[in-house]
């Protein structure tokens, strides 16, 4: 039995971020010990992926940033571009392998945080005693851990019931072109020149890393993911018929599905067990952005540990932001609001730094009202009025 103050389950963005931020001692100079448990190589470990966020300075993870951009652009369905500078902010991309390497180097210098590979099967909370974590390593040997606090970042097996069930699903290619076709200073945030589905919306997403290389993604907000062939067909169409970039070499691929729902995700799983990351509600339901909220959540936990307080994670997004997300998701799902036109209007008319704060759930009430003034008022009000009467339904089976 390995005993520690803290066990972190999962070595993704949330688990690594929390381990990276944990202090060595509390303010009373009490030593803090922790164990980070990551799944062995296999189906339970997430594949390589990218995370994007925006910030004004170099930031804690600057050395792991793949690329950053000072201009954002969107294209309407009719091809009208809207280009905006976001200074003093920069839009940044981190690849998960680079992020893990940065944190691994840091943890190697912090012997009070132990890292092991094992598959966690059970968390057993006992009132008045430690929580027991039961796991097995790659050889099948049993691993028993006990901790005062457990932070679980594993994906939920099933999401709670919700009134809206949408998915943000995507497939992206890291490509190299023969010709210098990309502008490394500009990130294409939403390009709605893609064929729009019958339900939901679609867009292209382009993050250039040089004149010849970029991550190019096809994304949909809709009820169900596509097949691999359908994603590839959509990407081929977007790159060749919309962007016109010519022949490409595909260097790597990423694919994912993000629930867009008003399901209520609570951080507390037991008195001493807390969910963090996506499972703890860090994904913004209306946009899919997660990384910045993970940093806020894990920093709050680390501050509480340092102060010697109960380290319960705070809600990653304020209640007002979650209510606005619920209205927008329902309006998009019912078709009352035209998604491409809605996002283009916001990007065209709202000051971009305010819009980015809004997308991150960090605006004040007067700013939310200013943003809301550019939304289609009647459909939004009708949707807000009906939400309280709608039942929450279980998620459809995959």
Image (spheres, grey):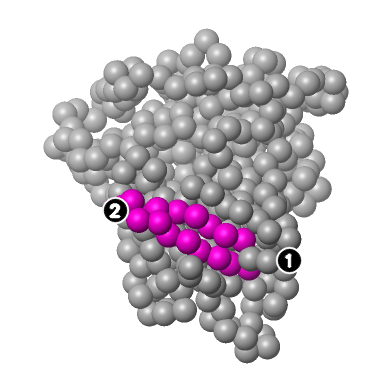
What residue appears at the point 80 percent right and 24 percent down from the top-left corner?
387
* Mark 1 nearby-residue class (10 Å; few <14, some 14–19, many ≥20): few
Q: CA distance from mark 1 to mark 2?
A: 33 Å
Task: Pick whichever of labels 1 and 2 is earlier in the sequence.
Answer: 1
**SS at mark 2?**
loop
Q: Viewer-proximal residue, 304 or 88?
A: 304
Q: Viewer-proximal residue, 229 or 130?
A: 130
Q: Would you identify the image quadrant in which residue 305 lies? A: bottom right
Q: Is residue 334 above or below residue 154?
A: above
**SS at mark 1?**
loop
Q: Is the magenta region chiefly helix, strand or loop?
A: strand
Number of marks in the rendered image:
2
Where residue 139 is drawn, which disc sits there?
2
Residues at badges 1 and 2 in contact (C-beta under 8 Å)? no
What residue appears at the point 33 percent right and 51 percent down from the top-left corner?
140
Q: Is residue 56 above or below residue 119?
A: below
Q: Is residue 140 above or below residue 57?
A: above
User: Is residue 57 visible to us here?
Assistant: no
138 in the magenta segment: yes
Q: Is residue 242 above or below residue 90?
A: above
| Residue 260: image location, x then y, percent | 59, 31
> Which residues lie in the magenta part?
131-148
What residue appears at the point 50 percent right and 64 percent down from the top-left corner?
145
| Residue 8: image location, x then y, percent | 52, 61
User: Which residue in the rendered view is the most extreme toward the left?
Assistant: 178
Where residue 128 is drawn, which disc sits there?
1
Q: Viewer-proximal residue, 232 or 336?
A: 232
């Amino acid at each position: 039995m390995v005993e520690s103050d803290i066990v972190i389950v999962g070595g993704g963005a949330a688990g690594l971020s929390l381990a990276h931020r944990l202090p060595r001692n509390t303010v009373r100079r009490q030593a803090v010990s922790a164990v980070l448990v990551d799944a062995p190589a296999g189906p339970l470990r997430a594949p390589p992926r990218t995370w994007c966020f925006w910030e004004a300075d170099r930031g804690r993870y600057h050395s792991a940033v793949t690329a950053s951009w000072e201009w954002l652009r969107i294209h309407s369905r009719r091809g009208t571009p809207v280009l905006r500078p976001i200074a003093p902010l920069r839009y940044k991309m981190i690849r998960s392998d680079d992020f893990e390497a940065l944190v691994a180097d840091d943890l190697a210098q912090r012997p009070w945080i132990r890292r092991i590979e094992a598959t966690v099967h059970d968390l057993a909370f006992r009132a008045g005693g430690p929580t027991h974590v039961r796991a097995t390593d790659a050889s099948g040997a049993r691993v028993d851990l006990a901790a005062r606090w457990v932070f679980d970042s594993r994906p939920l097996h099933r999401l709670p019931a919700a009134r809206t069930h949408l998915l943000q699903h995507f497939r992206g290619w890291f490509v190299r072109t023969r010709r210098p076709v990309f502008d490394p200073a500009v990130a294409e945030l939403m390009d709605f020149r893609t064929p729009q589905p019958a339900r939901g919306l679609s867009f292209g997403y382009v993050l250039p890393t040089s004149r010849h290389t970029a991550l190019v993604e096809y994304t949909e907000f809709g009820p169900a993911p596509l097949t691999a062939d359908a994603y590839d067909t959509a990407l081929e169409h977007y790159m060749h018929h919309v962007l016109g970039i010519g022949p490409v070499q595909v260097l790597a691929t990423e694919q994912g599905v993000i629930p867009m729902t008003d399901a209520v995700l609570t951080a507390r799983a037991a008195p001493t067990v807390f969910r963090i990351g996506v499972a703890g509600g860090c994904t913004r339901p209306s946009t899919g952005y997660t990384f910045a909220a993970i940093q806020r959540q894990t920093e709050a936990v680390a501050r509480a540990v340092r102060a010697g307080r109960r380290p319960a994670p705070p809600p990653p997004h304020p209640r007002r932001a979650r209510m606005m997300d619920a209205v927008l998701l329902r309006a998009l799902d019912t078709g009352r609001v035209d998604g491409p036109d809605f996002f283009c209007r916001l990007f065209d008319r709202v000051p971009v730094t305010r819009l980015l704060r809004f997308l991150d759930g960090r605006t004040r009430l007067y700013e939310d009202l200013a943003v809301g003034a550019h939304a289609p008022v009647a459909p939004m009000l009708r949707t807000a009025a009906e939400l309280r009467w709608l039942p929450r339904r279980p998620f459809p089976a995959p």
